Image (cartoon, coloured by chain):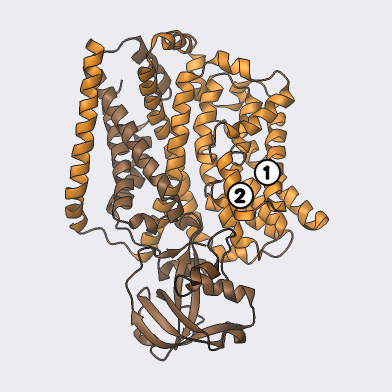
Chain colours: A orange, B brown
Amino acid sequence: MEMTRKRLLSFVLLVLVILLGTFLLDNLLPVLGMTPAINLPDMAQNYVTTFVGLFIEAAPFLLLGSIVAGLISVFVTPDDMARVIPRNKYIATAMGALLGMIFPVCECGVVPVVRRLYQKGLPTSVGIAFILGAPVLNPVVIASTYAAFGLSTIFWARIGFTFVIAMGIGLVFTAQPDLLKVVRPATLAPIIGGSTDLIPIESIKIESFSTRLQRSFGIAADEFFDMGRYLVVGSLIATTMQSLIPQQVLISIGTSPITSVIALCALAFVLSVCSTVDAFIALYFVRTFTSGSIIAFLVFGPMVDIKSILMFLGVFHRKTVAYLFVLPLLAAILIGLVINLNLGW
Amino acid sequence: MNRPETILKALILSGLGLMFYTKISDGTLAFYINQRFAWLSFIAVLILSALALTMVYRLIEGRQGRRGNEEEHDHAHDHHHGISWGALAIMAIPMLLGLFVPARPLGASAVNSRGIGLSAPQRAGSVTTAQRAATGPKNILDWLNEFTKNPDPASFNGQVVDVIGFVYRDPRNGADQIWVSRFAISCCVADASALGLLVQTSAASTLTNDSWIHVTGKFKAGQFAGEGVPVIIPDKIEPAQQPENPYLYP
């Protein structure tokens, strides 16, 4: 009874807030808009526009990723995880690389999700394969790559090489099964704390669905703040780099089989655009750049860029982040060069 | 539970939601991202409102002193490495910049850092030039696509052109030349590339950078930076309104 009344009260409150909010937005904002807005010099204005644009594009994905992370945190138990993950390390790692087909997240959403999965006992190597593979090997990105390139060599190469690299680097991490050597202790705090993670699992059983949902939203909000700061700082750095390195400089390097690969890897890193749309950006370069460089761009960009590096730093040790940067970069460059110099696609 | 922190989180989440909402409602979202992804911003407004309400709910529960086991564990879960004030301040940056810096699309000054493009970005599987031409005159992007298909500038001699864009001056231009330009964006302004058509006119000095113009005229083969390009010989240059979608989407 007490519970029902409280739910009703909070529902009425919610409706009131929404009504009030809509009223304020429609009536107050035009007034606010008329107040003298800050007038910035052109350079600063362009900087702000680019930064806000990058944030507006990426934040929805981070929000979705945070919601998924919150749901995992509340609804998935370590027991579930242990049941689902195969014993064989090769099969487990391959599964990690393909986990994005179930959790369709881009590189902004993948970090909060993997952090929660680690708390639930996901093996290190499977998480690494997931973090590198999921931003490409998920239905959304496969669809956008198809929209941009059709069933071309580039389409298959992107999917194939991403899988190979994600699984390969995941397997490298099987050499270090101790999760604490890979991730920051804070990532696993509830597990290290011991009992803290055990009691809620029991209490979950008696919690109502709506309470659990509400709890997962609370976790999602905290997750958004935890990871969002890396997104903001990453976007600021990416915007700064862009205003310092003119695109034209990178593009002028585009036709050589070797420098084009390095240039597009650098561009992918600097642009920091979401993996769901980078296929369309790669289309810009199709005519002027070598195929190897386009494939390297499409494989490396989603794995590592400025903002994802910063988000990695929130979860992993610096040494791990260095591996996560260097190994995909070398692999992508190698693939690009082999395609350009040996295969001649 | 840390009350000031929860209050600030609620405020920042609402502020970000408000930022997304205002960009959508006053149409300036088009200054930031490709309209194809506008639905993602709607989702962001919904999620941000839900998360802000969750924070408000957390505050109400905290005030009622209902801190049973469950909240204690939430505490352990959520604040395990105690978010700092700095982190909250960082999240306020996009909110403040988005709400208080007036929305303005990229203009002539941004072309300088990118360089003006003489060839169009491609996008397969979208509206083709032929389809779009049926609904109106070719825009700058359509023309650049044509130039790519047909590299001989002289082949466009005499073709009628009718485009809208902003004025840009390149250091390599003569005094009687300007560019009528647009930005093309695939995803968001971070990947904007500047496109332009060269206009040859004695009235060039009267046109200010960044002003929007409507140019009608005919093409004639000309030169830019040693390369042969089709140049517009205008019949008429009129001032124009900035289009609702200032960018073109390849």
- Which residue lies at the image location 23% right of the left edge and 17% below the top edge? A6
Mark linked to residue A159:
1
Tell me where residue B237 appears, x and y as whole percent. 37, 84
Residue A46: which disc? none
* Rendered view: A57 above or below B78: below
Q: Name the secondary structure under disc 1.
A: helix
Residue projecting furthest to the bottom: B202
Q: Do labels 2 and 1 share a chain?
A: yes
Q: In this view, does A51 lie to the left or right of A324?
A: left
Helix, strand or loop at disc 2?
helix
Which residue is outermost to the front? B134
Q: Mark 2 lies on which chain?
A: A
Dot 2 or dot 1: first in sequence order is: 2
Q: Is residue A157 above or below residue B250?
A: above
Amino acid on which disc 2 is placed? Thr
- Residue that numbered label 2 is attached to: A145
Can you tell which quarter of the image residue A283 is in?
A: bottom right
Label 1 near label 2: C-beta < 8 Å?
yes
**In this rendering, would A164 be left or right of A267?**
right
Q: Against B195, is A191 above or below?
A: above
- Label 2: few (<14), some or many (≥20) within 10 Å? many
Nearest the camera: A113 or A124? A113
Q: Where is residue A204 in the image (x, y as percent from the top left)?
A: 43, 12
Q: In which quadrant will I find the N terminus of chain B?
A: top left
Residue A330 in view, yes or no: yes
What percent of the width, then of the height, locates residue B250? 52, 62
Badge 1 amino acid: Ile
Q: Mark 2 to mark 1: distance in Å? A: 9 Å
Q: In this view, does A39 lie to the left or right of A276?
A: left
Read off the chain for label 1: A
Asked if residue B131 is positioned above or below residue A200 in the image, the reply reads below
- Residue A207 spot, x, y in % from top left: 38, 12
